[in-house]
Amino acid sequence: MSPRRSGPAQHRRIIWQAASLLLAYPDHGQDRRLDMVDRAVAVLDAATRLPLSAAVGHLRSTPLIDACSQYADVFDWKRRRTLFLTYYTAGDTRNRGMALLAFSDVYRAAGAVPPARELPDHLAVLLEFAATVDEKSGYELLSRHRTPIDLLHDGLIGVSPIYAGVIGAVSATLPTATAADLKEARRLAMQGPPVESVGLEPFALTIGVRGGSK
């Protein structure tokens, strides 16, 4: 399930930032984000750079309206391809509220204001935090949620190889999955996220993912 380990450890922030920008919702700031990714990944080795550069090329060659539609089809309507990491383990249950609060607490402890226009467990938000605010805390959160990240990667392979490549690049910066990780991933893949109708209020926290500040 784990992609090949990435290159030098000092490059992982570059990979996280590039992935964060590539996983942002396509909007009129996309060209600027893609230029940033192009410049950033130039220092990576060819194998590590390839999936990120492929995503840049795909998004540059896709009309914006089509890119928006593709993004929604890939990420917004399938619970096993969501970018919200706590959904894989907590679903629509009371436990998810506490899981979201834990993300916000990590952001605040690092001196960052939790996002106001996106849930704090959105993968692009976490990647930006890890890349630009607190590498250690961000790495710990990413590692703690590597099973959801791997499930997302597996769900994308047959649907969107381009986005699967971006998630694979992120996975390659994390510790190799343990036997317990693999067992939990199999269980979640078979059962899906828990379901509990509790009327969760939106946890309105802001690193722009939907037409925001990227």
Image (cartoon, rainbow, N blue to C red):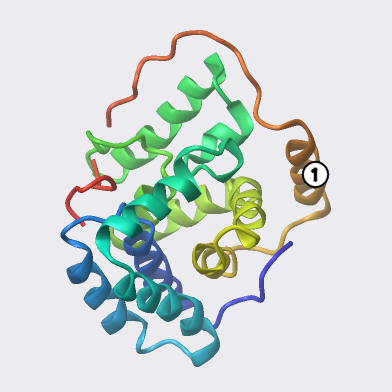
Query: Where on the picture, by quarter, is residue 11?
Result: bottom left
Compare residues 109 and 173 and report the one nearer the observer: 173
Compare residues 95 and 20 and report the one nearer the observer: 20
Task: Identify whether 47 is placed above or below 158.
Answer: below
Residue 178 is situated, as x and y percent measured from the top left of the image, at: 77, 56
Compare residues 170 and 110 and report the one nearer the observer: 170
Viewport quadrant of the N terminus:
bottom right
Task: Identify whether 114 is placed above or below 16.
Answer: above
Residue 155 is situated, as x and y percent measured from the top left of the image, at: 64, 52
Residue 168 is situated, as x and y percent measured from the top left of the image, at: 58, 66
Residue displayed at 46% across by 83% down: 49
Residue displayed at 33% across by 58% down: 66
Residue displayed at 36% across by 69% down: 18
Q: Residue furthest top?
A: 198
Residue displayed at 59% across by 46% down: 144
Q: Is residue 163 rendered to the left or right of residue 18?
A: right
Amino acid under label 1? Arg
Q: Is residue 169 rendered to the left or right of residue 36?
A: right
Residue bearing mark 1 = 186
Q: Crowding near pointer 1: few (<14 within 10 Å), some, many (20+)?
A: some
